[in-house]
Image (cartoon, grey):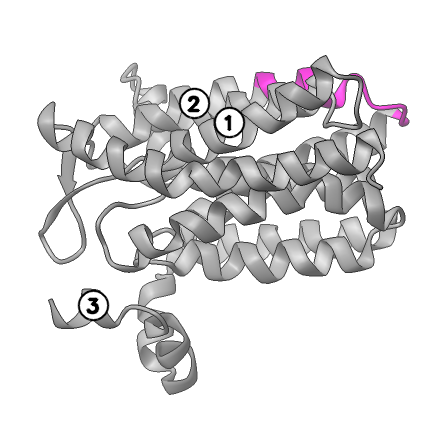
Amino acid sequence: MFTLNEGLFLLQLAAPLGSAFIGGRLIEFYHRVGAAQPNYRGRAIPAALGPALLLGYLPGTAAAHWLGGTAPSFAVLFLWFGFAFLGLWDDLVMEKTSGFKGHFQAAWRGKITAGFLKTALGLLVGLLFCGNLPLSPWRRLAALLLILLSANGLNLFDRRPGRALKVFFPGAILLMFMASVPGAAVRLLLPLVVGALTVAPLDLEARAMLGDCGANLLGAALGAGAVLYLTPASQVILLLFWAAVHLFCEFYSISVLIEKSPFLRRLDCLGRFRERFS
C-alpha cells in the first residue's frame, strides 16, 4: 500500500512523460508563428523546448504541494522558472553577439543584448535564491557562482543535437548518487530527468533545440542540487569544472575540440542517426 508521499512522487514522475507531447505541439506552434532559427546546418528549427520541460514538471509538483506531499520548495521552483524563461530572450531573438565578453562589451557601449539581459536578471534571481540559504556570506557567494556557471555552462554545450542532454544526464545521476541526502536529491531531480528523457528524441532528431530556456533550466537544476546536497569539497570541484568550461569557451570551440577527437565525435553522434542522414 502506497503512502501519500509515495503516490505523489509517482505522480511527479508520471506527469513529465507528457513533455514529449507538449514539445511536439510547441514545435508546431513555433513554426506557425515563425519562431524558428537556422541551426548549425542552416535548417530552420525552433530553439526553445524548455517550456515543455516545465509544463511536464509543474503539474505533479503542484499536486504534491496542494495535497501536502514532499515537493521542491518555492525557492527552488522560482530559481528554475526564472532561469528557464530568462533564456527565452536568447531563444527568440536572433543576435550575432555571443560570449560573456561580447555581451558585456556591447553593454559597455550602451547596446543591450538578449544575453546581457539574461545574465543580469539571472544574477538577480540567483541572489534572491542564495540569500535564503542558511550559509555564511562566503558560502552563499560560492553557491551563487556555482548556480550561475552551471546554468550557463550547460547552455554552452547546446550547439549540436542532444549534446547538452548528454552532459545533463550523467551529471544528474552522479549528483543523486553522491548527494548527502540521496532521497531528497532524487525527489528534486528525477522528475526533471524523466521529462528530459521524453524530449530527447526531439532534440536528437534536430526537430527542435533545448535552447537557452531548456539548457539554463537543466543547468540551474544541477547547480541547485549541488548547492543543496553535495559536500562543500564536491561543490568546489564542480565550481572549478564549470569555470574551466567557461574559460575554454571564451577562446576555443567545444565543437572543434569534439571534432578533433574520434571518441568524443562518436559520443556526440550517438543517437543522432536520423539527424545525420536526413
Q: CA distance from mark 2 to mark 3?
A: 31 Å
Question: Quadrant location of residue 262?
Answer: bottom left
Tell me whether circle 3 and circle 1 mark residues in contact (CB < 8 Å).
Answer: no
Q: Amino acid at mark 2?
A: Leu
Mark 3 or mark 1, which is nearer to you?
3
Task: Please name the residue shown 10% across and 27% down the image.
Answer: 32
Question: Quadrant location of residue 145?
Answer: top right
Residue 192 position in % (x across, y down):
57, 42
Tell me whether circle 2 and circle 1 mark residues in contact (CB < 8 Å).
Answer: yes
Secondary structure, mark 3, is helix
Task: Please name the residue shown 46% across and 55% down the image.
Answer: 165
> Where is 159 relative to 74, above or below?
below
**How many residues crowd mark 1 within 10 Å: few (<14), some (14–19), many (20+)?**
many
Q: Quadrant of the N terminus?
A: top right
Task: Confirm whether residue 126 shows in the render.
Answer: no
Residue 84 position in % (x across, y down):
46, 28
Secondary structure, mark 2, is helix
Which residue is denoted by mark 1 in the rendering?
83
Secondary structure, mark 1, is helix
Q: Amino acid at mark 1?
A: Phe
Which residue is denoted by mark 2 in the rendering?
86
**How many residues crowd mark 2 within 10 Å: few (<14), some (14–19), many (20+)?**
many
The residue segment tinted magenta is 124-136
Mark 2 or mark 3, which is nearer to you?
3
Task: Please name the residue shown 50% across and 43% down the image.
Answer: 195
Q: Which mark is residue 274?
A: 3
